[in-house]
């Protein structure tokens, strides 16, 4: 249990942040894909690193917080063998294996990411803040529930060889000493018959038969045959039959999550209309799958949800940049009308660049009140419109993800929009009047004079 953790298991938000920083994950050198941020978080809280990687990808697509958090983790999470993180090492607080030059490069990359993330405004946009809140909340809940767990133990090292005693041999010139001769035990006399040899009688040298059953007092070599009888080895005990392996109970998190996602999708599809669009349905289903993967990380289940989340993320990204149900064609579109009658009201593409050159039009309209209305639009690509130098233009430029540079005004970031900008020609009021609308979902828009 962490030092700041309450007896009940919960920590205050301030204590949780301090404890997270004190026990922050360390980026491993093995098993990582880029910088080891996902692997370090998974190792610290003992969850599947694939779930963390999918979370970063989804957070990058929806709101952009994934790439921001990954760069911050790269800068402020130390590697497993380092004293401090790369950012702290740059401030002289310890040693880090990341070079100072590369750390400075990461900081430089972080600046435009922050600018793109907040969309050029001090408060950012709703999706960006939502992605920040979701990732921050998930990290807080993860640390509350699994912060007491330490990182997974590293791979065991090779066993150390047993020390051996050095062998010392005696010099060959040293004389070998022979052991003293074995003493001859005294002959055991029989107690019942005294032996008295007669003079001149032949002496029988046959040794008497020894029929005793206990070894003599002096038998260092174990020469007594009756001492060789050893007990028979005990019969091995019968092995107990091993119990069959218990099948692990499969988690139902995946099944319940898929069922809930299908019910939500079916309900929204039945009520689709108005503000409910296919993008909203995909977003809700992805949110349910994300919650299921988070729950599966705690009960070791729901890994199959990843196979559903990845293609749905791609489909959701495609739906956000391509308007469903409106096919406008693929490929680049270039138009240069020579007369007012050749000008089309709309120049559109689903995927591709759109370029409209109006510089060859006459300097004035047929009537003084006539206004030329032109719309140029693409879902994925850039839009460029060139207007005559003396034309009076009223324009609206808008792009969801990109830069807008329209005559005297410019915007950059997410949801860049320039609305109802009026610009007179070089000759002042009068002449050709153009009402222009330029749009792009993902791409840059530009309006300039020829």
Image (spheres, rainbow, N blue to C red):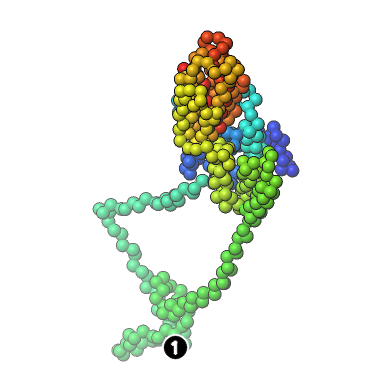
Residue ID for mark 1: 193
Mark 1 Cα-neighbour bin, 10 Å: few <14, some 14–19, many ≥20: few
Question: Who's the residue at 63% across and 52% down the image?
Answer: 258
Residue most toward the bottom?
A: 201
Question: Who's the residue at 59% across and 50% down the image?
Answer: 305
State the residue in front, 5 or 29.
29
Please indicate whether residue 310 sits to the left or right of residue 9 in the image. left
- Quarter placement of the N terminus: top right
Mark yes or no: residue 429 visible: yes
The percent coordinates of residue 210 (x first, y second) are: 42, 84
State the residue in front, 282 or 196.
282
* Above or below for 211 versus 141: below
Question: Who's the residue at 25% across and 53% down the image?
Answer: 173
Mark yes or no: residue 78 visible: no
State the residue in front, 251 or 248.
251
Q: Identify the image quadrant of residue 117.
A: top right
Residue most toward the left?
A: 173
Q: Give the SS element for disc 1.
A: loop
The percent coordinates of residue 254 (x first, y second) are: 62, 53
Question: Who's the residue at 56% across and 20% down the image?
Answer: 434
* Above or below for 319 versus 168: above
Residue most toward the right?
A: 8
State the residue in front, 100 or 115.
115
The percent coordinates of residue 91 (x first, y second) are: 53, 23
């Amino acid at each position: 249990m962490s030092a700041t953790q309450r007896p009940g298991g919960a920590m205050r938000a301030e204590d949780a942040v301090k404890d997270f920083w004190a026990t922050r994950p360390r980026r491993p050198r093995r098993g990582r894909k880029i910088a080891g941020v996902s692997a370090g978080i998974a190792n610290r809280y003992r969850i599947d690193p694939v779930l963390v990687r999918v979370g970063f990808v989804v957070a990058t697509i929806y709101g952009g917080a994934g790439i921001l958090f990954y760069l911050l983790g790269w800068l402020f999470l130390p590697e497993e063998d380092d004293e401090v993180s790369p950012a702290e090492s740059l401030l002289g607080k310890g040693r880090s294996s990341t070079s100072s030059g590369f750390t400075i490069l990461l900081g430089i990359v972080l600046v435009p990411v922050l600018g793109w993330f907040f969309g050029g405004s001090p408060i950012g946009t709703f999706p960006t803040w939502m992605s920040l809140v979701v990732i921050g909340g998930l990290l807080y809940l993860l640390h509350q529930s699994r912060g007491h767990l330490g990182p997974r133990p590293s791979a065991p090292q090779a066993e150390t060889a047993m020390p051996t005693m050095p062998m010392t041999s005696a010099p060959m010139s040293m004389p070998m000493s022979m052991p003293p001769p074995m003493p001859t035990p005294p002959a055991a006399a029989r107690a019942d018959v005294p032996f008295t040899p007669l003079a001149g009688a032949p002496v029988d040298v046959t040794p008497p038969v020894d029929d005793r059953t206990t070894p003599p007092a002096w038998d260092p070599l174990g020469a007594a045959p009756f001492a060789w009888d050893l007990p028979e080895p005990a019969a091995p005990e019968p092995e107990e039959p091993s119990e069959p392996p218990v099948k692990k109970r499969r988690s139902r998190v995946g099944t319940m999550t898929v069922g809930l996602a299908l019910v939500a999708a079916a309900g929204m599809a039945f009520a689709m209309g108005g503000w409910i669009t296919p993008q909203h349905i995909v977003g809700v289903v992805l949110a349910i799958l994300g919650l299921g993967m988070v729950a599966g990380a705690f009960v070791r289940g729901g890994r199959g949800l990843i196979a559903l989340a990845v293609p749905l993320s791609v489909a959701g990204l495609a739906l956000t940049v391509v308007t469903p149900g409106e096919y406008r064609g693929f490929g680049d579109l270039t138009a240069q009308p020579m007369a007012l009658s050749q000008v089309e009201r709309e120049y559109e593409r689903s995927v591709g660049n759109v370029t409209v050159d109006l510089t060859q039009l006459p300097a004035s309209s047929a009537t003084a009140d006539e206004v030329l209305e032109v719309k140029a639009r693409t879902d994925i690509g850039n839009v460029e419109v060139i207007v005559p130098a003396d034309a009076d233009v009223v324009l609206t430029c808008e792009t969801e993800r990109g830069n807008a540079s329209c005559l005297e005004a410019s915007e950059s970031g997410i949801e860049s929009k320039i609305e109802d900008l009026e610009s007179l020609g070089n000759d002042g009021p009068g002449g050709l009047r153009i009402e222009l609308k330029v749009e792009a979902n993902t791409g840059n828009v530009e309006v300039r004079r020829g």
